[in-house]
Amino acid sequence: MFKTRFDNGCILILGGAKSGKSTLGLHMCDNPGFKHIFIATAEAQDSEMEDRIKRHQSERGEKWMTVEEPLDIVSRISELDKDNTIILIDCLTLWLSNQFMKHGDNHEEIYSRIKELSECLMETKGIVIAVSNEVGQGIVPENSLARGFRDAAGYMNQRIAAFAKKVVIVFAGLPMILKDE
């Protein structure tokens, strides 16, 4: 289905909620010669999210080193990115939500963080697979915060897709390649 032996660089996986993005990301990381690092951006705020996190951890298996980082993924990527690493970030949309929780409606700061992240991902030494939700295909949100989030997510996905070596969108578990260099 997908080539799992990649050159260095960034791969972006997009899709809606529960579309199969994370499963595809794990499949694409099936490269035994690399160190596998999972950057988890979710925080367990309630028991349902705790259960989701545990389920995702069990799906990954033993070969993965998990790094929980809800806010400063740029520093973590810079610290962990090496020629022989595959970093799977799951997910950028939760990271962006965390930025909104921290910075509120300071859009200048949020867009600055997106720019910083995209610049970091442009310079990867190993392979970085970033999972992100596609949130712009629904109705226009009724409140300013939700519209701001949707706009920031679209901007983030566009910036990363512009330089990513591969961009894939997943619908109902079915991946479609949008870009493949």
Image (spheres, rainbow, N blue to C red):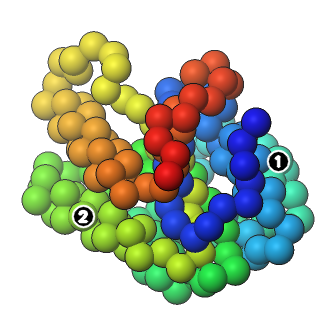
Q: Position of residue 179 (x, y in %)?
A: 47, 42
For residue 97, above or below residue 64: above
In this view, the residue in front, 72 or 118, is: 118
Density class for disc 2 (Cα within 10 Å; few <14, some 14-19, many ≥20) is: some
**Is residue 56 in view?**
no
Report x, y in % for residue 22. Answer: 65, 42
Write the residue at 58% across / 70% down. 8
- Residue at 47% of width from left, 82% of height from top? 78
Which residue is at the far front? Answer: 181
Using the image, determine if residue 135 lies above or below residue 105: above
> Label 1 is placed on what type of residue?
Glu
Residue 44 relative to residue 149: left or right: right
Q: Which residue is the site of mark 2? A: 115
Q: Quadrant of residue 127?
A: bottom right
Q: Are marks 1 and 2 in contact (CB under 8 Å)?
A: no
In the rendered image of this protein, does residue 19 appear above or below residue 155?
Answer: above
Q: Quadrant of the N terminus?
A: top right
Question: Helix, strand or loop at disc 1?
Answer: helix
Q: Is residue 178 visible?
A: yes
**Which of the 4 image quarters holds residue 29?**
bottom right
Residue 140 is drawn in which quadrant? top left
Percent x, y of residue 63: 85, 67
- Expressed as whole percent of the image width and height from the top left, the position of residue 142 reads 18, 18
Among numbered discs 1 and 2, the one appearing first in the sequence: 1
Q: CA distance from mark 1 to mark 2?
A: 31 Å
Residue 62 or residue 85, whichever sits in front: 85
Estimate how packed mark 1 is, as few (under 14), some (14 to 19) or many (20 or more) residues with alpha carbons within 10 Å: few
Residue located 21% across and 37% down the image: 151
Q: Which residue is mark 1?
A: 59
Marks 1, 2: nearer the viewer: 2
